Amino acid sequence: MIRNYRQRTCFRAIGMFVLGMGTLLAEQAQVVAPKQVQQLLTKRFPQVNIGECNDSDTNPLVFGNIIIQSRNGNISLHGSDNQGNPWAAQMEISPVSECQVWASDLGKNQRQDLLILSMGTNSSGGWDSQLSLLLFDENGRPFPWQAIGNFGADSNGILQVVRHRTNGAAEIIVPKLGGDRYTGLSYAYNLLGVTGNLIHRITVAEDSSKWPLLVSPTKDLIDDEHTYEPSTLSGGAGPAKDASIPRSFIAELDNADSMQDEQLILSTKEVVGYPKLIMIDKSNGERFIDFDPSQDEIKQLKSVNASVQAIGTTCDRGNCQPLLLWAKE
């Protein structure tokens, strides 16, 4: 069954905290998205629903040669590329979070990509919803991307995945929330485009509007937006191909006891934060993607001197970190 998430407030287990949250949600509800956002939301990009991320050990979701299983909020995906090399991806969501899997040819390259929407369950009223993508290249290998924001869906797909008016390409609106009802709520709307199996940030839209669009911006939100770079294009100049991965490795883990403050010091002397996602290409041709990497996985990459590349930056309420750490063993 396809559920309509357009007007959800995502309370569930946190319903007991309604007292005190009513004011916050009322303030959020009063915010009207900029007209550019409203116009784009009318141009829906076609999507096909695969199913819900229910516990599915005995009855997993199947899409082509891809198997999607979920158990207590642990979602795993398995498939193989065009050469038969296996790949796997995994993520964790709240066991009470509603989740949908969709398919769509986002890159307009005759290949179906996967979209996984996990609805938020905290007191921010849905602004912690998680959109995760697996975008497939010409060899059938997945490339990950993820954003946190106020996403929703109805029977036609994820609302914020829209169509470019002229060329029909897919675009993604990422609505972000900053501040609180004491310091002041502020909002940012980012616009991203899909190029093949990669994501690029759009700063000037078709109507000449400049993005991100900010509503009641605070200094903290503006600082976040100056750092936020959710692209998987290498330096914005071209795709992050295998050949562009530098021969650097993790030389040191600084403050390894704290994932929030941990830093990775690379052999190039570059210092990067704890990554949001990791993608590991193994010597036997396998690819492994983790949307919630563990410290043990990072330590393992260090121990085998895997070559690594940090791609993109994601920011959420003052905390910025690399979007993706791409490693080759």
Image (tube, rainbow, N blue to C red):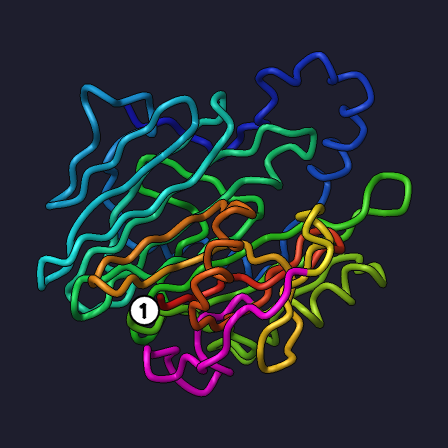
In percent of the image, x 23 and y 62: which residue is there? 141
In percent of the image, x 32 and y 53: which residue is there? 288
Q: Is residue 138 left or right of residue 295?
A: left
- Residue at the front extreme? 303
Callout 1: helix, strand or loop?
Answer: loop
Q: Nearer the viewer, residue 267 or 315?
A: 267
Q: Is residue 293 above or below residue 312?
A: above
Numbered label tally: 1
Q: Is residue 45 above or below residue 204?
A: above
Relative image position of residue 31 (x, y in whole percent): 71, 46
Q: Within the image, what quadrant is residue 1 found in?
A: top left
Q: In the rendered image, which residue does mark 1 sit on? A: 169
Q: Nearer the viewer, residue 158 or 123?
A: 123
In percent of the image, x 36 and y 68: which residue is there? 328
Residue 59 lies within the magenta run: no
The magenta region covers: 230-253
Q: Quadrant of the C terminus?
A: bottom left
Relative image position of residue 45 (x, y in whole percent): 32, 55
In percent of the image, x 32 and y 35: which residue is there? 155
Disc 1 packing (10 Å; few <14; some 14–19; many ≥20): some
Residue 237 lies within the magenta run: yes
Q: Is residue 142 left or right of residue 171?
A: left
- Residue at the bottom extreme? 237
Relative image position of residue 203 (x, y in whole percent): 56, 77
Relative image position of residue 184 (x, y in whole percent): 86, 47
- Label 1 sits on what residue type? Ala
- Residue at the right extreme? 182
Q: Is residue 7 above or below residue 218?
A: above
